[in-house]
Amino acid sequence: MEGFLDFAVNRIIPALDAGLWTSVLLIVPASLLGIAIGVIVGTARVYAPRPVGKALDWYVSLFRGTPLVVQLYFWYFALPYVSIGGVNLVLSPMWASIIGFALCSGAYQSEYIRGGLLSIKRGQLRAAQALGMTPLTTITSVVLPQAFRRALPGCGNEIIYLIKYSSLASIITVSDLTGMGRSLAKSTFRNTEVFIVVGLYYLALVTVATFVLRAVEKRLELPGFETKKD
Amino acid sequence: MDQPAILRVENIVKTIGGQRILDDVSFAVKKGGLKVLIGPSGAGKSTLLSCINFLSPPDSGVISLDGKPVNGKSKKELLALRQQVGMIFQDFNLFDHLSAMENVRVALIKVKGLDKRAATNRAMEELARVGLADKPSLYPAQLSGGQKQRVSVARALALDPKVLLLDEPTSALDPELIGEVLTVIRDLADEGMTMVMATHQISFSASLADEFLFMEKGRIVERGAPAVLLSRNSGSRTQSFCAKLSELAGDASCEIAS
């Protein structure tokens, strides 16, 4: 490991910084979309009419039940051969990854949200109904603000996972952190140094995300909704 | 005496899981009246109250408010009905993520369409009315049971209901907290609020009610003025039920003050 510091500063860090930006561009939209999908799907699975709920149960089973790599292969390699109404959709590696991550993450997020929804006592729904609220108002003003708070630790956990499985984008040719690291390792044969630093970059990303999530939890905290009991 | 009934309940039948919970129940309340539902658990008191605002829609029978029968099939009519009929629950059912003031305010904004300032002012007025003017920013988790129930009364009153339905409003409270809620209910009765209340607080409600309705197995089996039903040798079901309750409670309060 001679000259590790030089090698790290001159070669690894510049390469990974470029990849870092790409990774962030994957992670941020995918996690936000994932949450949005999770909230909508989770809510619909609990409150929507039977057929809709059933269909969404299938969505969750499918995306939780198949490997993410296979899903990414599908979005990137297979989708161009699938003709939908005469149109063949070709996604860029970035878009294929974002969509793949968001749909997979959304399936998991919907489970956390569903759990949060089910934790709300029926009495509050009856009270909202008795005040003349429509079902939609009840969901947006009474149910979701509470369910989201209860689901937040789980949702945050899923985002941490997403940061790490975003590395799979590299197998469909995205030059993210992992992708950049792999090319550098290939061309320099210094696998050990490169992958240690790649690991540290992910560790840093997760640390920042943990910090942000904790700040969000703190901001949304209300008496009766403490995430930490002391 | 010929004042028309503000709320009329006619021939209500409700079956849940093959069991007849309400069996042809009828009564009517005049403006400012207070009907008290008494009877053993499982008699159908709660179900009757939630049939009135269609939280559990009756299988048959007619609910009329201000002389107009409610069409249970029309969602719009039901939403309008519920704005005019307030409900107080045994376990308060406050919205846990909202402060006391926001609990009272939320329906003013989301249902009545008031702007935030007007709604806040109104919510503060209602909190003051139930003696909680100094606690608007506390959350349900920070309030005692009695305070929670008073917030829920304020929340119902904010919508200017024509009738208030109270489903055992003090049953979930510690004994020392019952008084503050009863005081609020007495004030409402004195102000002329029309109410239908299920309760086990028989001697308290005797001084306010214009009629007791004694329910058993889904039917109103006895009805009349509290003074008549509770008189020592009336031989009424109400009297013996009340005597049993006060025996269990260890006091001899099954009498009316007047």
Image (cartoon, rainbow, N blue to C red):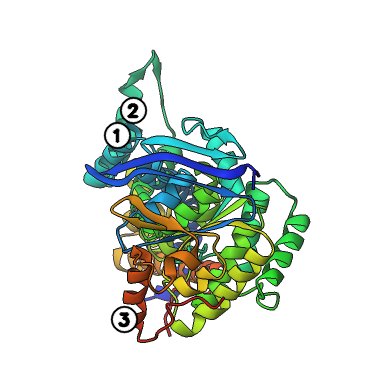
Position of A173 compared to A126: left or right? left
Give the amino acid type for the residue marked by disc 2 in the picture.
Leu
Where does the image place residue B178, in percent across and percent down from the top left? 50, 78
Relative side of B37 to B117, left or right: left
Tag 1 subunit: A
Kindly state the secondary structure of the residue where label 2 is placed. helix
The circle drawn on residue A74 is 1
The residue under label 2 is: A79
State the image coordinates of residue B22 (x, y, percent, origin top left).
33, 46
Mark 3 Cα shell of 10 Å, populated few (<14), some (14-19), many (≥20): few
Q: Is residue B169 above or below residue A176?
A: below
Amino acid type indicated by mark 3: Leu
Q: CA distance from mark 2 to mark 3?
A: 74 Å
Please give the label number shown on residue B248: 3
Disc 2 + disc 1, Cβ < 8 Å: yes
- Picture disc at residue B11: none
Task: Determine whether the residue tagged by mark 3 lies in a helix, strand or loop.
Answer: helix
Total label count?
Answer: 3
Residue that appears at 41% across and 66% down? A153
**Residue occupying the point 54% across, 63% down:** B209
Closer to the camera in the image, A141 or A181: A141
Q: Residues within 10 Å of mark 2 (few under 14, many from 20)?
A: some
The residue sitting at 29% across, 29% down in the picture is A78
